[in-house]
Image: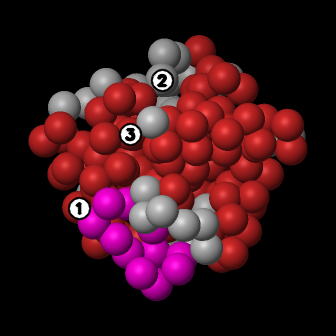
C-alpha cells in the first residue's frame, strides 16, 4: 500500500497530471482512504460502513470486488499514517472534474449513512472533505441527498 500511495502522491515525471487520463486504481485508493478516515472518525467502525466502501469502489472506480477489498484493507492499515486529508484530496482535485468529485463525495456520504446515523464528527469531516475538494454548499447538499435516497431505497 505504501508503494501505491507513493505512486499516487508522487509528482508525474512525464508531464502534467491534467494531460493524462485518470488511473481508476489511483482514484480508488485516494477515495477509499477518505472513506476509511470517515469510517474511523466516530470510533465505531461498522461492518456496514466497510462493506459500503467496497461497494462504492466497485461501482464508481471500476475495480473488481477483490481489488476493492485489497484496497480497503491496505487503506485501513495505513489510515493512521496519513498526515492530512489534503494528501488525498489534492490528487482527486488534479485528476477529476467537478462531477467526478461529486461522485466521490456522494460515496463518502453513503459510508456515513451505512450505519443508519450521521454522527456530528462524521458530518464535520465530510464538510472539510467537500471544502478540500472545492465543492460548494449546493454540491455538498446534493451529494448528501443523493446518498440518503440511495441508502433508503
Calculate the distance from the C-alpha at mark 1 to the C-alpha at mark 3: 15 Å
- Point out residue 41 in the picture as x, y percentages from the top left corner: 53, 76
- Point out residue 75 in the picture as x, y percentages from the top left corner: 34, 61
Q: Quadrant of residue 139?
A: top right
The quadrant of the rendering that contains the C terminus is top left
Calculate the distance from the C-alpha at mark 1 to the C-alpha at mark 2: 22 Å
Residue plotted at (67% across, 58% down): 126
Mark nearer the viewer, 1 or 2: 1
Q: On screen, 140 above or below 20? A: below
Confirm whether the magenta stretch covers residue 120.
Answer: no
Residue plotted at (60% across, 66% down): 118
Q: Are marks 2 and 3 in contact (CB under 8 Å)?
A: no
From the image, tell me which residue sits under label 2.
Answer: 22
Calculate the distance from the C-alpha at mark 2 to the C-alpha at mark 3: 17 Å
Q: Nearer the viewer, residue 62 or 1?
A: 62
Q: Is residue 59 left or right of residue 127?
A: left
Q: Quadrant of residue 25?
A: top left
Q: Is residue 11 left or right of residue 52?
A: right
Residue plotted at (24% across, 43% down): 68
Q: Are marks 1 and 3 in contact (CB under 8 Å)?
A: no
Circle 3 crowding by C-alpha within 10 Å: few under 14, some 14–19, many from 20: many
Q: On screen, 35 above or below 67? A: below
Q: Secondary structure at mark 1?
A: helix
From the image, tell me which residue sits under label 1.
Answer: 73
The quadrant of the rendering that contains the N terminus is bottom left
Q: Secondary structure at mark 2?
A: loop
From the image, tell me which residue sits under label 3.
Answer: 56
Residue farthest toward the right in the current orientation of the protein: 137
Does the rendering let one see residue 88? yes
Q: In the rendered structure, which segment of residues is drawn in magenta?
A: 39-49
Residue plotted at (38% across, 75% down): 45
Amino acid at each position: 500500500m505504501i508503494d501505491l500511495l507513493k505512486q499516487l502522491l508522487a509528482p508525474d515525471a512525464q508531464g502534467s497530471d491534467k494531460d493524462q487520463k485518470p488511473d481508476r486504481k489511483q482514484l480508488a485508493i485516494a477515495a477509499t482512504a477518505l472513506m476509511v478516515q470517515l469510517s474511523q472518525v466516530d470510533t465505531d467502525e461498522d461492518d456496514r460502513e466497510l462493506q459500503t466502501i467496497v461497494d462504492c469502489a466497485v461501482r464508481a472506480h471500476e475495480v473488481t470486488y477483490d481489488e476493492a477489498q485489497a484496497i480497503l484493507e491496505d487503506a485501513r492499515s495505513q489510515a493512521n499514517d496519513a498526515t492530512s486529508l489534503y494528501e488525498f484530496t489534492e490528487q482527486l482535485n488534479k485528476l477529476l472534474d467537478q462531477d467526478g468529485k461529486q461522485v466521490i463525495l456522494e460515496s463518502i456520504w453513503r459510508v456515513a449513512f451505512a450505519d443508519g446515523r450521521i454522527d456530528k464528527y462524521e458530518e464535520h469531516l465530510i464538510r472539510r472533505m467537500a471544502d478540500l475538494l472545492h465543492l460548494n454548499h449546493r454540491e455538498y447538499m446534493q451529494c448528501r441527498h443523493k446518498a440518503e435516497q440511495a441508502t433508503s431505497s
